[in-house]
Structure formats: structure tokens, C-alpha cells
Image (cartoon, rainbow, N blue to C red):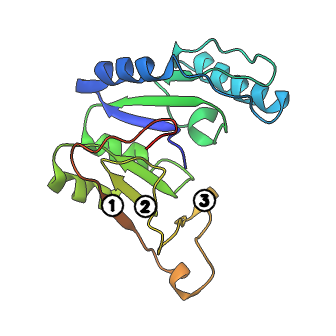
Amino acid sequence: MSSNRVIVQASIASALVDAIKALSSPLQLGPLFTTALAQNVIDAVKEAVNMGAELVLGDAQAHGAMVHPQVLLGISPGMLVWDRETFGPVLGIAVVDTVEDAVQLANASEYSLTAGLWTTNMYAAQDVASRIRAGFVNINGSTVHSEPLVGARGLSGASGYGRFDVDSFTDVRVVVTHPPGRIYPLVGGV
């Protein structure tokens, strides 16, 4: 449930890309499980670049089983980094003009477990969250968050259909609103 795709409005895209690069470039990550998995991750990055995405951080190289953080700008459906999980340190960013474009792009995925929505307008966030097809939509909080009594659940597609009880055959959604000013650590710590 880590964030693989980021959809950002054009007016703040440059600032967000700069912040992501600043946070990601010093990260020291451990190896992936196998060199073949590392190569699959890099192949997906290279495919995105060949299809028009810009590699704004990373070297598009596997170093044995190690892959340094890779950040792509301009990803879209049809690219492996959009359509599939890489299971590696890859973040793809898509830039849109409107909220409507963002919702449409957010729903252009087979995955439906969780989404994160960041905004200063909580009323608009509630409206947008209800239109994103995900089992969880976290407002102003990380995608890696679920409520213990509900648990993670997909709404269909590659994420599955939740559990197989009566409630699992309904379209249940959860919207979590996080308090303003809460800072979530990227790696370890509290």
C-alpha cells in the first residue's frame, strides 16, 4: 500500500517534485529480494522514459539487487509504472490541470486498496474522496494507513474484492481525515 503514483495539479507540481527529490535523494535503501526483481523494476523505469516520462531522480540502473530511489515525472496509464506495482523504490508523478482530471486519473487503475488525498480544503476533500474508487481514502495522511476494525479491502480488479462474507459483496469505503500539522515520519521513528 505504499504510494506508487502521485497525481498533482500543475500549479504546485514543481514545488512538490522539488520536495520529493529533496526527501528521496539521501535515502539509503536495502536490496530487493533478487537481482531479477531489481532488473524488473529498472525495466519498468526505462519503459516509462521511452514512453515519454522524465526521470527526475535516479540512475535507471540496478546495482545487483540494489535500486536507488527513482522518481519519474509525466507517467500515464499504459506504462508499467502506472498499470502495475513495481515492488521497488519507484515513484511516478502525473500532472493534471483540474480536480476532475485528478479524479479520473486516480480511477484509471486496476488497484483499489488505498489512496491519499492532500488538500487544505476539507469540504472539497470529502467530495473528492467519495469519487475516488478505493477501499480507503486517507485525507492529509499516508496511503499506508487503515483502521484496525475495518482492515484493508479492495473494491475490485487486481486488489481483489475484500473478504468473502456478506459485507464483502458491498461497496464499502472509508475516508480518514488526519489533523492539520501532523507530520508522519518517512523512515522509522515516531
Q: Which mark is residue 159?
A: 3
What residue appears at the point 69 percent right and 28 percent down from the top-left corner?
30
SS at mark 3? helix
Q: Position of residue 8 (x, y in %)?
A: 33, 33
Asked if marks 2 and 1 touch (Cβ < 8 Å), the reply is yes
Q: Quadrant of the C terminus?
A: top left
Mark 1 packing: few (<14 Cα in 10 Å), some, or many (20+)? some
Say whether residue 9 is left or right of residue 90: left
Q: Is residue 126 visible?
A: yes
Q: Which residue is mark 1?
A: 176
Residue at mark 1 to residue at mark 3: CA–CA distance:
20 Å
SS at mark 2? strand
Dot 2 or dot 3: first in sequence order is 2
Q: Is residue 54 above or below residue 16?
A: above
Q: Position of residue 84 (x, y in %)?
A: 63, 42
Q: What amino acid type is highlighted by mark number 2? A: Phe
Mark nearer the viewer, 1 or 3: 1
Asked if marks 1 and 3 touch (Cβ < 8 Å), the reply is no
SS at mark 1? strand
Q: Is residue 79 visible?
A: no
Mark nearer the viewer, 2 or 1: 1
Residue at mark 2 to residue at mark 1: CA–CA distance:
8 Å
Q: Nearer the viewer, residue 184 or 127?
A: 184
Q: Nearer the viewer, residue 96 or 129?
A: 129
Dot 2 or dot 1: first in sequence order is 2
Mark nearer the viewer, 2 or 3: 2
Q: Which residue is mark 2?
A: 136
Q: Is residue 90 above or below residue 181?
A: above
Say whether residue 43 is left or right of residue 13: right
What residue appears at the point 42 percent right and 38 percent down from the top-left corner?
185
What residue appears at the point 45 percent right and 74 percent down from the top-left corner?
171
Q: What amino acid type is highlighted by mark number 1? A: Val
